[in-house]
Image: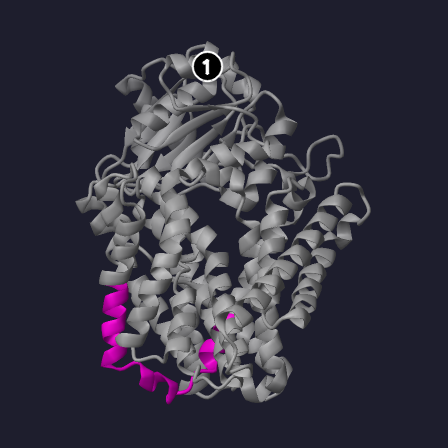
């Protein structure tokens, strides 16, 4: 099969699996595994090794390097400071403990030879934010254990990779010099790792210097960054095998902590590249599996999986958190939840190829890593909600609303959302404007929402909707445009009617949020109506009391704002979308204060009936 056709098929399967995961809520990593396995060994649609030959190894290696760089770029130590001692203990103590215990389990129970067991155990240290974060959103765990799991996953991604590199380099050096002592082998590896780290740091410093000073034009920043990562990876590998993984990891972490404002604009593209690479590598590796390799998945490996779930992970957590302030119910929860993800598979696939070059049987690693990923995702994904509930660690699972701008109207909206039991947060840079929010006892954040420091101090995980309603329409549009990449373009809203793009005096609709209210009320409109006594009303629909009946009870001028489903899902009425209300929904409207009598409702129905008849005539 032509290489171009294989590339197209890999892309289609990988991205298609991620789209299906988004639609169904199933784990994307399992769907990608199934897609690659079906296309490769089951149906024989393509064979990556036959299609790409010698190019397959460097393709996977560069893909893994870019994924590790992207992971390092997520590790901002300013955020980590707020995660507490639990994360530091799990990293500094838990990482080595998990490595040692995992190696013993992989050798004595799983039957792997010591070098392969040690390398595999090092990679097993990673949990991975790409699988941990969706699980936490799905189960709505309380803030502290969720933060510990999140940051453990982010920090352990590069640490697991470093453990694997150190293991491989040590055994490669021992193979090349069988009679060498430990002191002859280890110092050169340490020196090579330091040099590789310095190369990564210097590259990061050069980018941090060049980008803000205009030395690189905007349209070249992403290409320069990606090319720099590849160059650093290849150059460091010339110094020592696989030292490039250390270099690109250090490069990503260094850039994340150098406060380079220019990097904010490339984050969406960086995330897109990571999604494409993850999809491609995962499908290629699963399609490369052979049925002979699955022979390693015997009862020995089944026992190893049980040991990993019920011995290694609990012992790691309990030992590393011994004497800490983390409560026991949270320790037990952390002892159970440790799903593995794409980094485990990607690094295992890379070193499976490398181990054979130095005389060890690494063919089992790809199949074993896939088995660990599937087992941990299934075991933890289906039980996280139950375990969190049993340990009294359930938070609110209802989608929340982040409101930017503290005005009388937004405070009234926030109070209504509280009545509906939806998490809400009011954000404003003015302490004086937040006075009413403080008086009403509403959750608030005092700070500039666009400031990067806010991202380090304000956890956005509970909020699936953003409403920008300050008195400055251009500022509202800027906030919506900034957060559209993180929350979603369809879930950022602002007041004001959508403007015709042909009006050269107005903000283009492409950078605005969705317009709240079908009528397009602006900030002045809602505040003026609030001053005249308008209020938010909530109405529960049922089979007998329909949406039409609810509208009849409301004044003619009332405007529908949103509806809340039984599961807490929020749907807004906008100029571009009108959700379909159904029985069980709660309708929220913004309406005049006067009460309507039964006669008024009947008169309104008559007017609508007459209007319909006139239109029909």
* Residue 303 belongs to the span the image colors magenta: yes
- Against 616, is 118 above or below? below
Q: Is residue 395 left or right of residue 12?
A: left
Report the quarter where the N terminus lies: bottom right
Q: Residue at x 42, y 87 (%)?
A: 290
Dominant SS in magenta: helix
Give the vertical position of 288 relative to 435 (above or below): below
Range of the magenta residues? 280-309
> In the rendered view, does 520 fall on the left or right side of 113?
right
State whether residue 273 appears in this view. Answer: no
How packed mark 1 is, by other alpha carbons closer than 10 Å (few <14, some 14-19, many 20 or more), is some
Q: Is residue 413 left or right of residue 141?
A: right
Residue 65 drawn at (x, y percent): 59, 65
Residue 255 in sight in this render: yes
**Any magenta on residue 176?**
no
Q: Nearer the viewer, residue 175 or 320?
A: 175
Say which residue appears at 39% left-offset and 65% top-offset.
Answer: 124
- Nearest the eye: 447 or 585: 447
SS state under label 1: helix
């Amino acid at each position: 099969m032509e290489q171009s056709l294989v590339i197209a098929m890999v892309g289609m399967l990988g991205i298609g699996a991620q789209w299906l995961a988004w639609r169904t809520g199933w784990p994307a990593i399992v769907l990608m595994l199934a897609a690659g396995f079906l296309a490769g060994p089951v149906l024989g649609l393509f064979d990556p090794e036959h299609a790409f030959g010698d190019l397959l190894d460097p393709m996977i290696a560069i893909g893994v390097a870019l994924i590790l760089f992207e992971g390092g770029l997520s590790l901002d130590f300013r955020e980590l400071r707020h995660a507490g001692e639990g994360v530091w203990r799990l990293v500094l103590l838990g990482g080595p403990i998990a490595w040692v215990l995992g190696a013993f389990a992989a050798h004595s129970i799983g039957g792997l030879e010591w070098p392969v067991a040690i390398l595999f155990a090092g990679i097993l240290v990673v949990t991975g934010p790409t699988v941990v974060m969706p699980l936490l959103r799905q189960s709505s765990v309380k803030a502290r254990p969720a933060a510990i799991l999140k940051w453990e996953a982010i920090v352990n991604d590069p640490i697991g990779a470093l453990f694997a590199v150190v293991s491989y380099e040590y055994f490669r050096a021992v193979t090349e010099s069988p009679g060498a002592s430990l002191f002859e082998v280890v110092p050169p590896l340490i020196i090579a790792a330091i040099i590789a780290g310095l190369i990564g740091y210097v590259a990061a410093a050069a980018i941090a210097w060049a980008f803000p000073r205009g030395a690189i034009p905007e349209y070249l920043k992403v290409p320069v960054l990606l090319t720099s990562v590849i160059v650093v990876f290849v150059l460091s590998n010339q110094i020592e095998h696989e030292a490039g993984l250390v270099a690109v990891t250090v490069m990503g972490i260094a850039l994340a902590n150098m406060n380079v404002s220019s990097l904010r604009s490339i984050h969406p593209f960086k995330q897109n590249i990571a999604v494409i690479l993850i999809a491609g590598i995962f499908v290629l590796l699963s399609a490369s599996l052979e049925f002979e390799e699955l022979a390693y998945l015997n009862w020995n490996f089944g026992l190893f999986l049980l040991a990993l779930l019920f011995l290694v992970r609990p012992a790691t957590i309990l030992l590393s958190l011994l004497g800490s302030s983390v409560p026991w119910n949270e320790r037990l929860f952390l002892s159970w939840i440790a799903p593995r993800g794409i980094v485990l598979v990607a690094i295992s696939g890379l070193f499976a190829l490398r181990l054979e070059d130095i005389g060890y049987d690494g063919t089992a690693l790809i199949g074993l890593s896939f088995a660990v990923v599937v087992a941990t995702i299934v075991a933890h994904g289906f039980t996280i909600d139950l375990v969190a509930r049993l340990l009294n660690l359930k938070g609110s699972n209802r989608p929340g609303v982040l409101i930017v701008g503290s005005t009388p109207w937004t405070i009234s909206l926030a109070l209504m959302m509280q009545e509906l039991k939806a998490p809400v947060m009011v954000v404003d840079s003015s302490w004086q404007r937040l006075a009413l929010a403080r008086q009403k006892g509403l959750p608030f954040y005092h700070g500039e929402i666009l400031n990067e420091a806010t991202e380090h101090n304000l956890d956005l995980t509970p909020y699936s909707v953003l409403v920008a309603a300050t008195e400055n329409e251009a500022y509202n549009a800027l906030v919506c445009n900034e957060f559209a990449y993180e929350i979603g373009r369809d879930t950022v809203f602002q007041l004001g009617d959508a403007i015709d793009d042909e009006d050269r005096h107005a903000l283009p609709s492409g950078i605005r949020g969705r317009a709240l209210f079908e009528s397009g009320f602006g900030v002045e409109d809602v505040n003026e109506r609030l001053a005249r006594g308008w209020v938010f009303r909530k109405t529960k629909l049922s089979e007998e009391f329909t949406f039409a009946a609810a509208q009849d009870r409301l004044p003619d001028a009332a405007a529908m704002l949103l509806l809340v489903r039984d599961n807490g899902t929020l749907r807004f009425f906008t100029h571009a979308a009108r959700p379909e209300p159904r029985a069980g929904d709660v309708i929220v409207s913004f309406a005049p204060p006067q009460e309507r009598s039964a006669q008024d409702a009947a008169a309104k129905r008559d007017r609508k009936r007459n209007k319909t008849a006139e239109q029909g005539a």
